[in-house]
Amino acid sequence: MARGSFFLTLLVVALKPGGVGAVDPLTIGSPAPELKVNTWVKGDPVAGIEKGKVYVVEFWGTACAPCIKCMPHLSELQRRYKGVVFACLCDEKEKGVRDFVAKHDKDMGFRVGWDERGRMWAAWMVAAGLEGIPTAFIVDATGKVAWIGNPTEMGEPLRLILEGKYNPQAAVIALRLRHARKEAFRKENERLDRGNRLAVQVEQLILQKKASEAVTLVDEAIQKEPGERVRYGQMKLQALVADPKLADRALEYGIELTAAAAARANEDRPTSQVLLHIASLLSAPLGGAPSDTRCCDLAIEIIKCARDVARQEKDSGEQYQFELRVHADAQLAHAYAGKGAYDKAVTHAESALKAFRTASPLPWANDKLFQQNMEACAKELEASLEEFKLKAGMVPRR
């Protein structure tokens, strides 16, 4: 036990993010916070953390499937280690907690406390910089936090803590990784949010006939975040294509952007999908501007490139490959229509619709979102096909 506490002291110092004078987060090796619960829904009340005893403090929720799944495991550990104090806390409405415990009583062989106003959540989870449940804290007999993690993984560390053989090194590394992943997700969400806000601003400017302002806005964003060149570049292309006076720049930038997209792996979606999106921007300007025939020619070449790239994307799956084939033909139809080649537009629109109809019911019928997207695409294409036929002189004018 003494050896483990020595390691805990060393490791908690190593985890301090702000150096001397910083407020330490709750982590492995920290003194345990208070355990003060006024309402115990099940089991004997616990007055607080007492030295000489080992505690498991776990946070769960009534609608949390992983929490419910690990309850038999927690019950088994409580039966095996009767001297360990298990305190499983929930901060939802008291009636909901009581109703849940009454329904699942046989699976809950441990104390259950109602965390009124989330005071224990703040003292433990927030202090540790954690959000996800289920999360368990093991407090050793010295009153220090010895382990933090998913309750399904605490059987081995709990045994070693009780035997005085515990070395927290692996747990510290796991906790650091958990924090690093959380921070990475936060940064990724911020990145996506910035892009979404920029896209809305660009579309608004285009619809206000301020394409040049939109281009400047995107250029400034790319300068701040060079790594977003391909993603933000699609917004810039959308703005360039929307103004006929910027058609020359749209053509040149479309070529440049396509080359950049094809040369690098795209984090957000497969490269072939990015290329198809670039093609769609070139052939169907936002805001009702007429298509530039040169941009439509470029779109056709980009679609061919997307098909070539897709053949090399072996991990994309049969479903994605099918979707790409349908969308590629649909985009070709619009590109040919944009340059006035309505007979070819009809051919490709019919090819896309035939692929969709002959595959119905689709092998991926359980994927409702995919089905809805494909059906919406088919419905839109059917309307476009009628327009293409009319302009190609294949149906009489009404």
Image (tube, rainbow, N blue to C red):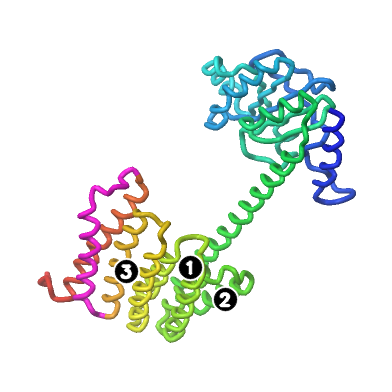
- Left or right of 137? Residue 152 is left
Image x and y of residue 164, in percent: 80, 26
- Which is in the foreground here, disc 2 or disc 1? 2
- Which is in the foreground here, disc 3 or disc 2? 3
Report the amino acid beneath label 3: Gln
Q: Tag on residue 299?
A: none
Q: Earlier in the sequence, mark 3 or mark 1?
A: 1
Q: How many marks?
A: 3
Magenta-colored span: 340-366
33 is within the stretch colored magenta: no
> Residue at label 2?
219
Report the amino acid beneath label 1: Gln
Image x and y of residue 159, in percent: 71, 25
Q: In which quadrant of the rendered image does the C terminus lie? A: bottom left
> Residue at label 1?
204
> Residue at label 3?
331
Does 362 sit above or below residue 208?
Answer: above
- Which is in the foreground here, disc 3 or disc 1? 3
